[in-house]
Amino acid sequence: MEARLGLQKIAFGPAQVLRPTSWFDTIDLRDPTGQTDGVEAFRLRIFPSNSLSLWSWVINSNSDTLSYGGRLEVTTLGGDWGLTLHQDPVASRKQVGLLPIFMSEPNTRAAIDYRYDGFVGFWFEGASLFSSVDYHSNYDRYNLLTLGGDFTFPIANGILVMTESMQIYGTTRTDYDTASKETTEQTYTVFMASMPVGLFHRFMVVAQLDWQSKRTYYYWHWGITYDRFSLNFSLSSNPKRADYALEEEYLPTSLAGFGNGLQFTLIYNH
């Protein structure tokens, strides 16, 4: 059994970039620090057997409102399964993790995920987020599905190639009493390749496509890792800030800036 109280990371699911279950974290594969926003929570994990684990958590929001949920993880000969359910009673507009999704009312989140590791790796994540039904309030509903896979080519020290695609279908009603509603459909695809060179160097390239808006994002990374510190050089090519018709707080924080950028990061491990 494992219990944690206080500021912590709560993250789960096999997807690496396009993650329907990134409900409480801001993990980004392109961030060399690997850091994420934490949540103030109490989390309990129980392991009845080597193939079964049970999670439960209670999270305190900025408005001192408690949200709660749980997760079941099962390991079988055919792969790893996960079932997740979360109830969020906070009645304010908020972004869900790094997803391009904003919930306006108290909502429920349910998800299923699966991962198989064999000759090739394969995984999927499916999630549904929907507002609690109130005939005098806004109503949001989103269904998300990500399919992904990876394979390591036996070239040099090994070249890992990964791809993911995510489909988002959403319905928003500003007045539940009327038939007025807006629907959105978004599709994203990511390609990633990484290769270690020697004992210290690692190269990675990531390309992301937004099929609806016809935007593309590119990211190149060169990392040099030693015992106590690492050097990281990153080059990104993204749409410009003016290409987003969004308020500052709703901009996609997962991107390494806007336009073309060059970044150097020195990380010291202690």
Image (tube, rainbow, N blue to C red):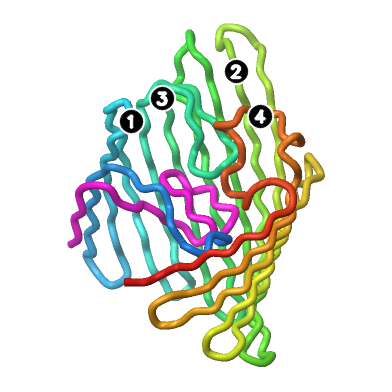
Which element type, helix, strand or loop, lies under badge 1? Answer: loop
Q: Residue tagged by mark 2?
A: 173
Q: Nearer the viewer, mark 2 or mark 1?
A: 1
Q: Residue tagged by mark 3?
A: 106
Magenta-tinted stretch? 1-28
User: What is the quadrant of the N terminus in the image?
Assistant: bottom left
Which element type, helix, strand or loop, lies under badge 2? Answer: strand
Q: Residue tagged by mark 1?
A: 62
Left or right of 117, for residue 149: right
Which element type, helix, strand or loop, lies under badge 4? Answer: loop
Going from N to C along the chain, the mark reached first, 1 or 3, is 1
Q: Is 164 covered by the magenta stretch?
A: no
Q: Is 3 covered by the magenta stretch?
A: yes
Amino acid found under the numbered disc labelled 1? Asn
Given residues 116 and 203, the one toward you in this image is 203
Q: Residue tagged by mark 4?
A: 246
Amino acid found under the numbered disc labelled 2? Arg
